[in-house]
Amino acid sequence: METNNVQSSASSGNVRSKTDPAWEHFTLSINDKGTKVYHCLYCGKKYQGGGIYRMKEHLAGKSGNILPCGKVPPDVRECIKEYITNSTSSKSRGKELVKEAYEEVEEVEEQEINPTKNFGKRKAKGSLENFITSKPTSLSQPGIKSAMASKQAIHKANMAFARWCFDACIPFNAMRSPYFQPMVDAIGSIGVGYKAPSYNDMRVNLLRDCKKECQLLIDSYRSQWANCGCTIMGDGWTDQRQRTLINFLVYCTTEIYFVKSVDASDILKDATNLCNLFMEIIEWVGPDNVVHLVTDNASNYVEAGRLIHEKYDHIYWSPCAAHCLNLILKDIGKRDHVVELVSRASKVTTFVYNHIYILSWLRKRWKEIVRPGVTRFATTFITLKSIYDHKHDLQALVTDKYYTSHKLSKSPVGKTVTSIILDGKFWEECLFMMKIVAPIIRLLRVVDADEKPSLGYVYEGMIRIRKAIMAIFINKSTMYGPYIKIIDERWDKHLR
C-alpha cells in the first residue's frame, strides 16, 4: 500500500510529463526503494531513474545516455526523432531538462548503494548539451500531435474509410489508382471540417472541370504531333447493350490519347461513312500531323483506308496485328474437329455451372472455368487449357462417392459428362489443340500489350508460329498443311 501511495503521488505530481507523447510507449512504476522504473512496451526492458527525455532517446535510437530500442516500429522512431528535434529548437526546453536532471540526481541519491558504480552510470545523463535545448512552442505542438497519432486513431480513420468503400461497393483496385494518395493528402491538408463534393457537384461541375483539364493536357501535346507525326487508331467493338461503338485514339512517341467514342449503331458502316468519321478526326488532329492509320481488317475498313490515302497521299493505312491473330484463331476454331472438341468441353462446363453442389465441390480445389461461347478471340482455347489443367480434379469428381451417389450422375446429361471426362481421347485432343494455338496466343499477348511497341516482334513471331506448328506434326505436311494455310492466307492478305 505504501508503494502504491508513492507511485500515485509521483504520477500526480508530474502532470507535465504525462502530456508527453512518449508515455504511450512506456509504463511507469516505483520499486521498493522509491526509484522510478520505466518499462518499454516494445523491447520489454526496464530502466531505473531518469526522466522521460531519456526514454525518448531510447525510442529514437540515440546512444550515450541509454541503450537504443531494437524493436520499436520505424514510424514511432521517426515521430519521436521529430519530436526531439522540434523540442531542441525551443528556448524553454533548457528549463525542462534542468528539472529532469535534478529529478535524476535526486533519484540517484535515493537508490545509491554502490557509489562508484552508480557514479559511472550517471555521467552521460548529465551532459551539458541537454541543458541548452528548448521546449516546443505552442505553435509547433499541433503538428507534433498529429505526427504522434496513436494506433487507435489511425485504425479509426481506416475503419471509417473501409466502411464507406464497402457500403458504396468500391472495388479494392481503386486503391491502386495513382490519384488515390494525392486525394487523401489533399483532404488531410484541409483538416477537420472538410465537406466532400455533393452528388450534383460530381456529375456536373467537377466532371466538366476534369474534362477541361484533359482537353488542356491534350492541347499541350499538339506540338509533339507536329514535330514527330502521329497515328490515328480506330477500335470498333460491341457493348453489352449491343451498341456498335468506335473508339478513336491518337498515338505518338510519348503516349496514346483517347479522342472520343462514336455510337455507330444507326450508321451504315460502309467505306464512305467510315471514311467520313476518320476524316473528322484527321481534321481535328491536323492533316499535316497524321502519317498513319490503323483499323480492323474488315473489308469496309480496308476500303476506308484506301479512300483516305487517295485524299491525303502521305497517310498510310495498315491493319491491326492483334485483330489479324484473332482472325487466325477464329479460322482454326471453325475446323470440324475443333468444333466437336469445343462442343464436348462446353457440355462439361455447362453441367458444372448449372449444379451448385458440383461447382462448390470443385471450387475447393480450383478457381473458375471460363465458359466457351461464340467469341472472336482466344477465349475458347483458353477455356480448353483451363479444363485440361484440372483434368485430375474433374476425374476425381466423377469417381468420387459424393458424385456417384447423387441422382445427377445417373441422369442422361450426367452420364454424358462422365463419359467425356473419362475419355482419354478427349484429353489428348485438348492437349493437341493447346500446343497448336499456344504460339499464336503468345504472340497475341505481345502485340496486344501496352508496355512497349511490338511491331518489331510480329514478323519473327509469325515465323516462329509456323515452325512450332510444323514441329508438332513432325514436319508431316499432310497434317500441318491446313493450319499453315490458314496462317498464310491471313498473313498474305493483311500483314505481309
Image: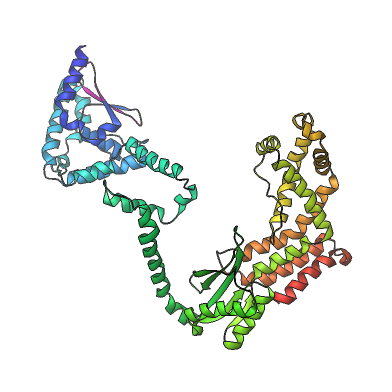
Q: Nearer the viewer, residue 210 or 270?
A: 270
Side of 92 relative to 222 (left or right): left
Compared to residue 132, the image places residue 267 above or below, namely: below
- Residue 222: name its quadrant: bottom left
Pinpoint residue 199: horizontal percent, then vertical percent: 38, 53
Pinpoint residue 387: horizontal percent, then vertical percent: 73, 47
Side of 363 relative to 81 (left or right): right
Compared to residue 319, the image places residue 402 above or below, namely: above
Q: Which residue is farthest top? A: 1
Side of 446 relative to 76 (left or right): right
Q: Nearer the viewer, residue 119 or 88?
A: 88
Q: What residue appears at the point 66 percent right and 76 percent down from the top-left corner?
A: 300
Q: What residue appears at the point 68 percent right and 46 percent down from the top-left corner?
A: 369
Tell me, yes or no, whether the highlighted magenta stretch contains residue 359.
no
Pinpoint residue 168: horizontal percent, then vertical percent: 45, 45
- Residue 315: name its quadrant: bottom right
Tell me, yes or no, whether the highlighted magenta stretch contains residue 32.
yes
Compared to residue 172, the image places residue 297 above or below, namely: below
Residues rendered magenta in the picture: 28-44
Q: Is residue 51 visible?
A: no
Q: What residue appears at the point 58 percent right and 72 percent down from the top-left corner?
A: 234
